[in-house]
Amino acid sequence: MIEKILLLGLKARFPGVMATAHCDIPCGIYDPHHAQMAAHTVIRMNMLMADLAKSPPPETEAEHKMARYTATKEQHAEIAKHEIRVLWGDYFKPEHVAQHPQLHDLVFKAMKAASKARQEYNLQAAEDLLKSVNEIAAIFWKTKGKETTSVKAPYPTERELVLPKL
């Protein structure tokens, strides 16, 4: 009971202001890069799975490799979803959606593509995920007043990567 009274007294003396961020500090650090990396990883795992099917090693080794590729693909599809949720829930504000009305649908499509890429061995779903994530990245950087550039990623996927012009 005394703790409750002390806590109420502290709250009255030092009222706090509610703040939120992806880490709830708030740190103010947001970036679509992790979602992009995750999407590239999902594509790469699909590529490795296809390569494995073309020239399979001995059965036990093939099973282990396929299990690892599948686990990594699923993990990174979930990372992409998490990073998109953080941007959507913590970074993007109503004014961003007003300026970019396609954002809501784009986030929805990215989440669905990530789910499909996680559930299936499906390179097209992985490509769709990357496309959506790159479009979200372009909007993200626009909201920060940064122009973007699209470059060929330096990864084995050799797919597009949207980056801010610094």
Image (cartoon, rainbow, N blue to C red):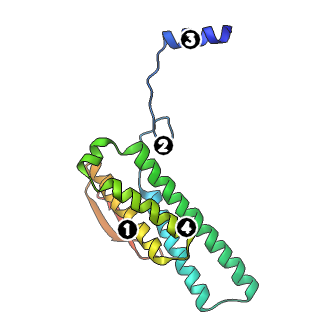
Q: Which residue is denoted by mark 2 in the rendering?
A: 22
Q: Nearer the viewer, residue 152 or 88?
A: 88
Label 3 element class: helix
Residue at image location 71% in from the left, 80% down from the top: 63
Question: Between disc 2 and disc 4, whose residue precedes?
Answer: 2
Question: Between disc 3 and disc 4, whose residue precedes?
Answer: 3
The part of the image, by quadrant, that contains residue 113 is: bottom left
Q: Which residue is denoted by mark 1 in the rendering?
A: 131
Q: Residue furthest right?
A: 60
Question: Between disc 1 and disc 3, whose residue precedes?
Answer: 3
Please name the amino acid that badge 4 sits on.
Arg
Label 2 element class: loop
C-alpha gap between disc 4 and disc 1:
16 Å
- Residue neighbourhood size for the residue with mark 2, other residues' Cα within 10 Å, grouped as few (<14), some (14–19), many (≥20): some
Q: Is residue 117 visible?
A: yes
Residue at image location 53% in from the left, 63% down from the top: 77
Q: Nearer the viewer, mark 4 or mark 1?
A: 4
Residue 93, percent across and down?
A: 33, 42
C-alpha gap between disc 3 and disc 4:
47 Å
Question: Between disc 2 and disc 1, whose residue precedes?
Answer: 2
Q: Is residue 44 left or right of residue 148?
A: right
Please name the amino acid that badge 2 sits on.
His
Residue 49, percent across and down?
A: 58, 81
C-alpha gap between disc 2 and disc 3:
28 Å
Q: Is residue 17 left or right of residue 93?
A: right
Q: Is residue 137 visible?
A: no
Q: Which residue is denoted by mark 4 in the rendering?
A: 118
